[in-house]
Amino acid sequence: MTEPRDLSPDVQRLVAGLDAEQTEAVLAPRGPLCILAGAGTGKTRTITHRIAYLVQTGEFSPQQLLAVTFTARAAGEMRGRLRSLGVQGVQARTFHAAALRQMSYFWPRHFGGHLPELVTSKFRMVGQAAARERVSTTNDMVRDLASEVEWARSCLIAPEDYPAAVQRSARETPLPAEQVAKVIARYESVKKRAEVIDFEDILMSMAYMIESVPDVAREVRGQYRGFVVDEYQDVNPLQQRLLSAWLGERDDLCVVGDASQTIYTFTGARPDYLLDFADRHKGATVVQLERDYRSTPQVVALANRVISGSAGRLAKARLRLVGQRQDGPSPTLRTFDDEQSEAAAIARRCAELIENGTAPAEIAVLFRINAQSEVYESALADADVPYVVRGAEKFFERAEIREAIVFLRAAVRTADESEDPLPDLVRRVLASSGWDPSGALGQGAARERWESINALVGLAEELHAADPYVTMEALVAELDHRSAAAHAPTIQGVTLASLHAAKGLEWDAVFLVGLHDGMLPISRARTPEQVEEERRLMYVGITRAREHLQLSFALARNAGARASRKQSRFLDVFGGGPTSSTPPAVRRKAKVTRCAGCGQALTPQQASRGSCERCATSGNTLFERLRSWRLETSRSHEVPPYVVFDDETLAAIAARQPSSLMNLLSVKGVGETKLGRYGSAVLEVVAAGSSGAAK
């Protein structure tokens, strides 16, 4: 490697502030270069300085370099960083944007006329293809079939080869593979008849033109001499074919990736191209970036432990991150009785972080599937914490939820509720709307839709557990209440996002929620390869956190339900199993249940009721009075009892017996909003209970 003293002053300034491995990557000789960059190791900084170095040393002019990313946001960030380094004119684009720009230039010259119209959505034509093949054309089915069309074409799989490819990959399909193959073939004929092209056509056609038209190949390869590809672990076969066409026989290629962040194989991504890079490009330089500048050493240590349990080929390529920041709080693992308790506790913790100076936009709650968002939207709204939903519609804005509420509202006027408990009635009403109460069928959009509607059944079970006589009218009122709260202004707020949508982002504080087996890994992950991808998904979630990280799961879905869930197998690193080595710092963070009244640590038997013997004896009668008051209040306000206060908060009030609003505000679970709404009434109950005890 070139010594710093041998560099020109301009290049010395360029590498100033880079660590040794980043500098090695920037100064690597021309030719194939593979940068294995772990989470938070400064990969964007490294590759932009690499591009600037190649330009400053005269190896390439800016116009001869093409940097390819996977999102327009990442491309924009790269262009901005290059401008700050004084480099103008480098093309930084997504695969599709780069190919479309080239196609728009070459098509009129070689085929005459304008480029055919580009359709940005396959939905309409896939629906037509499905109808002609006499299969279901519901919105969910068409969306899932469109995903299969994209997967097959991105993987260069012809319709006739699709069934065998599905079997090899153990892929779930919305219909029998033979039927899906017919829809894929029909889609191609529908598209051809309409004389339009889609995004896969752009990539395929550009690759074909370079491969088959010498003038096009000569001009493209004359224009672009060097290539940089970010997130190379996510490249699919179609994108790799275009990249190979751009390169030709040349080897001026720099790729950047991390096998441990491979989480999109279901869309056709192939980490093999990254893993095999040195074999396919003889003499390639390989540099590993393992110094993590994003997360505290405590977060980094947990990420390393989780990914160290991986198996298979990708495990051999994993990087071991080394935290570079100062020490921070250890990650914590919390267990809750039910999902509502989990959400409420996290909402309270978000409020505490914000009160202590953390910006709401620097906090994220991450989950496995979008259907999990509703309980957190509701809990954050109840706690007056603003939030934004990233990568999906808000729960009450989803089409299937709006439609289901219409059916439930109609049932208020027509249903006979004298016999059936609310959950059974809700299941019957939703079944009439097309929802199958027996369980989710298929995958993709259909499964997401089922999970979203099933959340309404879960709410009915929750209300029924609190009040066995709850009515359909009360359920609809609760839905209206939650919907109204969810429409509060949310521009600057806590981020709610799926783990997939969180890729490439980072926050000061991250809550990973719903981490039970069956959700992460998700139940449909059946093969060892699919389970390992779920592990990598958790690894991605952990490495989004800069400082605060809490992982949690609920033993049951609803209050009062059987506690049958087990924590995710990926969380075994928190225990003392034979293959885990949990540092003392993490063990000290094990959950300790404390008395709601005096705060002392409780035995398991005491923890079940939330207080020690002394506080339980003094507060038992008052606790029951508070529960009675809560039931009356919830009925008069037409809300579930837990919306007023949960049992944990009532137990704390009974134990402490606050005598003023300020004393009451210090009780965990009592915020300013609930203090103003219920504070005076609670103090009256406490005062009456205290005087009764004195008598």
Image (cartoon, helix red, strand yellow):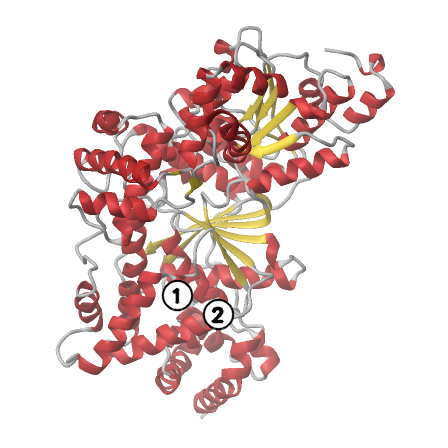
Outermost top residue: 283
The answer to whether the residue labelled 2 contacts the one labelled 1, judged by CB atoms less than 8 Å apart, is yes
Q: Secondary structure at mark 2?
A: loop
* Residue 487 circle label: 2
At a point 77% along the width and 24% down the height, the residue shown is 15
Outermost right residue: 9
Residue position marked by numbered label 1 in the rendering: 396
Residue 170's spot in the image, x, y percent? 25, 30
Residue 605's spot in the image, x, y percent? 36, 60
Q: Is residue 162 left or right of residue 324?
A: left
Residue type, label 1: Phe
Q: Secondary structure at mark 1?
A: helix
Q: Is residue 519 above or below residue 415?
A: above
Instruction: Give the mark nearest the N terminus, 2 or 1.
Output: 1
Q: Is residue 657 above or below residue 595?
A: below
Q: Quadrant of residue 557?
A: bottom left
Q: Is residue 600 visible?
A: no
Q: Quadrant of residue 72?
A: top right
Residue 670's spot in the image, x, y percent? 52, 73
